[in-house]
Image (cartoon, rainbow, N blue to C red):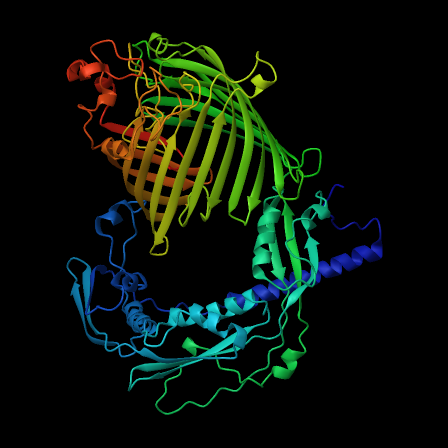
Amino acid sequence: MVWQPQGLNLNVDGRRSYRRILRFLKLSAFLFLAACSTSKSKPDVLSTRTSLRVQNIEIKGVRKVDVEMLRKGLATQEDPGWRTSIEGFPLLGAPPVYYDPNVWKRDLDRIRTFYKSKGYFDIKILNEVIRKDVKNNLVSISISIKEGRPVKISNVGLEGIPEKYREKIEEKISLKKGDIFVQSEYLQSKTELFDQLRDRSYAFASVRGRVFVSPKTHTANVLLYVDPGPSAVFGEIEILGLKNIDMQRVRDVIAFKENDVFDPKKIEETRNAIYELGVFSLVKLTPIIEKKETPTEKPKEEEDEIVDDFFGDVIDTAQENADERIAIDPKVPIVINISEAKLWTVRAGAGAAMERSRQDIHLKFNWGSRNFLGGLRRLDHFNTFGYAWAPSIFETAGEAHNNGFIMNSELRFTQPRFLERKTNLEVKLALVREIDPGFSILSPSVKIGVRRKFFDHLTVDLSYNLALFILSDINQSLQTESLKLQSQNVLEYFEQRFLLDYRDQILNPTKGFSITLSFQESDDYLGYISPLIGGDFDYLKPSLDVEAYVPFFDRRIVLALRTNASTIYNINRDKRPPITQTLYGGGIGSIRAFGRRELSPYSFEGEPIPIGGLTRVGGSIEPRFRLQENFLDFGDIWFAPFFDATTVLGGSYEFEFVDDSDFVPPPISTADIFTSMIFGIGVGAWWLTPIGPLRLDFAYRLTPIQNDKRFRRCADQPKLDGTCENDNFVPVGEDEIQNLLSRFNFLLGIGHSF
């Protein structure tokens, strides 16, 4: 169907054309009259702004409230000074601030209102001094405040709460007798009461309140009245907005049905479940709650009471509208509004990653189908192609230097409702080519697994993984008898992964925590079918990763914490785990003062090449500060100092499975972990963008490593387990490992460092 604009067509139908002309003339006349009627605007209010810049605002006597919050709420602010000379410069520049007497007068009222909202009704502004420097076009403002005694809550009366829930509901109310009366806490208590009732099926509940303030006694009597209404049930469920997706697929994930007891948690659970289908860009569930209100009369005030509607609504009496509320239909219909996402997506982009020990440039091309062959099946193809240098684009000498083409191509198929409603089947086929110091690797792999979500926040993944590793450009230092690094090997393992995620978001968390626990069991599983196929390694690899985010000051500051621990146990085979699966430290997700994979045991002979360890433990502390909101209308600017601590050791934690092995280092203890920890500090800054945080970090290593055996080359032939007999190391100045590792590092890329 093609839309074309319609004009006046006198040749087709004279009467119809006449009507169109008449309507057009009427519309034109209406618009003309409307324009004339609005042309006489009210005269502009005479501005009282002066040419004086506000040099300083001094507020004396502030003791009981947050002075910075008080200052921020004023319309009059201090002039930014030298920053006005670069007003158009992003982030640093700022416009000048001029003194306006009328605006400042209203600011004095704002100060009084602010104090009253915090419970200080006796607030007085004792004196005000305005010093004008006409010669320099400056003005300084100084006021003194007497805060007075705070108004404290003498009583909190709660009426109308159902007796069977009274004790539990009263415990949840934050407003307590003896506390200073704060407006925000009073309003919060009303919201808490309403939420508590709605969570117990009282969808039609209403909460009204009134605060009686006595200036003589500095007390506040708070009265909250609850009208719970009838206990509600879910009514008819209506789904709107579907075009290509089968409605039954949506109904299958709805967590409630008609006539079930009303529960807001079920509504949120349903919303999340519909989103997780992966084919909708917007999901909104609206309970249709209609209740008839009856106007009430305002109660009379007593002489010694100050009642301000700013602090509360008029209380309804218990019987005032009881008859009407008894007749309310307890059914709550639910309307689900849905917008379908594009079923086919194509995305392309470019990027770069820079660390001291590795740099790359790359292109990305991804495509996917959200409803592949129907049934909400998904097919996604993720592709990254680029070029990498390891350890550095600026280094061209040395046998360990490596550079070349990199790629990561992954085809992922997802089958929802596998065996049961909440379980998804996932199949991944991947082809990876990677560049590392000392070798290049080409690895085709397959992963077959199932994923299920429990209790909204717990996700469980069970999978079987098979990978072929083809190594090339192998440095001679990795081909010794002790390392036994082969040019080709097979790895297969089962993995169980448990993720408990209470973070508020994934890309830039500001609140909550996550705990990830995983186990890998590698063995020759296909070898039970035929001795010609199957994995070349036997090991057990448990890992734990914990993140936590604590917000402060309305999330302008976020304390980010992370700790992780992993170890590998060889089982019944005298052979090191593959160099691609051993544990490394340094770079993103670890101690940032080291480059990628630099914190590691090194090759026993020849050039210093990281080979990985069998135990890794680390953690980070990072207080994050938001410097500017919505910079250039694109995203927030953040800054963070950080402290990192990590260790990587060659042995397994506490015990080993392989006996009498010459190449396996002895087990390590908890004491070994703490005494071998390496510390680093640094600063980072990032700009939140739609594709993730664009971040730059600079880090410095605090711990000296000149006497650390892990980073010293043995002067004699080392043992097969990598230890040096009698600690006979080469001099520090001649040690290639010492020369390789710097105390500084920088990281540039998209995404958080943890």
Give the percent coordinates (x, y) of residue 647: 29, 30
Q: Residue furthest bottom?
A: 303
Q: In what quadrant of the picture does the N terminus appear?
A: top right
Percent coordinates x, y for residue 332 in the rendering: 66, 66
Please tell me which residue is depicted at 66% across the width and 44% down the height of the picture.
421
Q: Position of residue 470 (x, y in %)?
A: 48, 13
Residue under the point 78% across and 59% down: 19
Nearer to me, 679 or 745: 679
Residue drawn at (24%, 53%) of the image: 80
Picture quadrant of residue 718:
top left
Q: In the figure, is residue 9 to the left or right of 429? A: right
Q: Nearer the viewer, residue 469 or 132?
A: 469
Q: Can residue 494 be seen in this snapshot?
A: yes
On screen, residue 70 versus residue 750, left or right, reads left
- Quadrant in which residue 417 is drawn: top right
Residue 129 in the figure: left or right of residue 529: left
Residue 380 in picture, x, y percent from top left: 59, 31
Q: Quadrant of the C terminus?
A: top left
**Observer-nearest of 429 and 435:** 429
Q: Nearer the viewer, residue 218 or 331?
A: 331
Residue 60 vertical position relative to residue 340 in the rendered view, above or below = below
| Count of numbered badges drawn on the protein | 0
Residue plotted at (39% across, 43% down):
547
